[in-house]
Image (tube, rainbow, N blue to C red):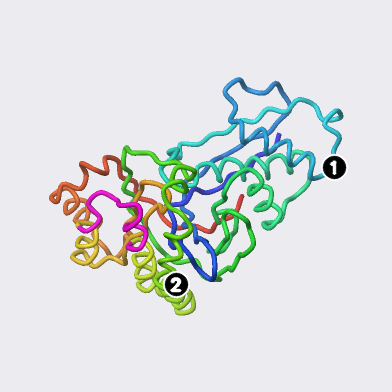
């Protein structure tokens, strides 16, 4: 038996046309997909992408499938699907590493990212550091060596949106039109990492969220911006190809009960019917 787990992401801290192409910076949180690989008959309700990943790993290491016994994939996850929380990346990345471990092998981050990209666009949660990543082609990955102390109040809408459906709605021309805004957000993000400033990071994430809201509106977005200002929290981020919103704060400095009361008073919780308190963690598969 071999196990691995990969974190979800509360949307993205940044996403858009940055440095000449679409890229993102995921926001890994302490919510995990846990995968166990062991000898045994495959489960009937197994996730197809996880099986494809297992087969890819077998091929990557050059094993003859005929010599490999039947393997069972047990994926345990409560991460909501099609909300922008990187549930699929978490599943397949954890499956890849658990499979490699079953064979007594390891996968480095770059190889893991490439294996995931063969199956679908991939979040940068596969990297331990906060990383600007070309999530469709893998041509760029720029890591920042700072892990912010950051709590997030996740606002979950009952609405769902798949990444593929989002890409059908938002084209490259739409993204190119926001290049100046997003490059500015990226520079501010880099500054926040250099200065270890959650405040600047929140400003960068909010800039990116504002740009994406013009293409993929979130319910009550302007009210959320006012709450950010009134409660003096760091900012907000969004799922750029999903439906969740994250309010960025420090639970030791900001009053989460007061924040929840403000959300209720404005009626925003009619749109965001589930809320989760979480925190930013290092990415990468454990």
Residue 230 locus on image (x, y percent): 18, 65
Residue drawn at 57 percent across, 49 percent down: 121
Residue drawn at 40 percent across, 52 percent down: 239
Residue beneath disc 1 = 62
Residue 73 locus on image (x, y percent): 65, 31
Residue drawn at 58 percent across, 30 percent down: 47
Instruction: Answer whether residue 212 is magenta in the image.
Output: yes
Left or right: 242 as drawn, with respect to 34 = left
* Mark 1 closeness class: few <14, some 14–19, many ≥20 residues within 10 Å: few
Residue drawn at 57 percent across, 61 percent down: 133
* Pick the front one: 77 or 172: 172
**Cα distance in 3D space between marks 1 and 2:** 41 Å
Residue beneath disc 2 = 189
* Mark 2 closeness class: few <14, some 14–19, many ≥20 residues within 10 Å: many
Q: Is residue 145 above or below residue 252?
A: below
Q: Is residue 3 above or below residue 265?
A: above
Residue 13 locus on image (x, y percent): 43, 61
* Pick the front one: 260 or 47: 47
Residue bounds of the magenta highlight = 210-222
Give the secondary structure at mark 2.
helix
* Pick the front one: 219 or 147: 219
Reading the chain from its start, which is encountered first: label 1 or label 2? 1
């Amino acid at each position: 038996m071999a196990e691995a787990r990969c974190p979800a992401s509360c949307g993205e801290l940044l996403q858009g046309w940055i440095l000449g192409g679409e890229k993102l910076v995921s926001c890994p949180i302490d919510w995990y997909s846990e995968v166990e690989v062991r000898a045994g008959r495959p489960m009937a309700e197994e996730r197809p992408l996880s099986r494809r990943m297992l087969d890819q790993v077998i091929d990557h290491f050059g094993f003859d499938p005929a010599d490999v016994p039947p393997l069972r994939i047990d994926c345990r996850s409560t991460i909501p699907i099609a909300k922008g929380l990187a549930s699929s990346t978490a599943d397949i990345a954890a499956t890849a590493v658990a499979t490699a471990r079953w064979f007594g092998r390891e996968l480095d981050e770059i190889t893991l990212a490439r294996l995931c990209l063969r199956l679908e666009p991939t979040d940068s949660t596969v990297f331990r550091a906060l990383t600007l990543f070309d999530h469709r082609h893998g041509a760029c990955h720029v890591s920042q060596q700072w892990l912010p102390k950051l709590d997030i109040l996740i606002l979950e809408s009952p609405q769902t949106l798949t990444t593929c459906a989002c890409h059908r709605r938002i084209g490259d021309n739409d993204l190119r039109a926001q290049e100046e805004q997003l490059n500015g957000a990226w520079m501010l993000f880099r500054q926040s990492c250099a200065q270890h400033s959650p405040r600047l990071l929140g400003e960068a994430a909010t800039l990116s969220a504002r740009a994406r809201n013009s293409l993929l509106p979130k319910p009550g977005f302007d009210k959320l911006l006012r709450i950010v200002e009134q409660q003096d929290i760091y900012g907000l981020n969004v799922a750029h190809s999903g439906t969740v919103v994250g309010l960025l704060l420090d639970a030791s400095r900001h009053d989460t009960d007061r924040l929840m009361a403000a959300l209720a008073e404005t009626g925003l919780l009619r749109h965001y019917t589930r809320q989760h308190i979480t925190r930013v963690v290092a990415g990468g598969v454990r």
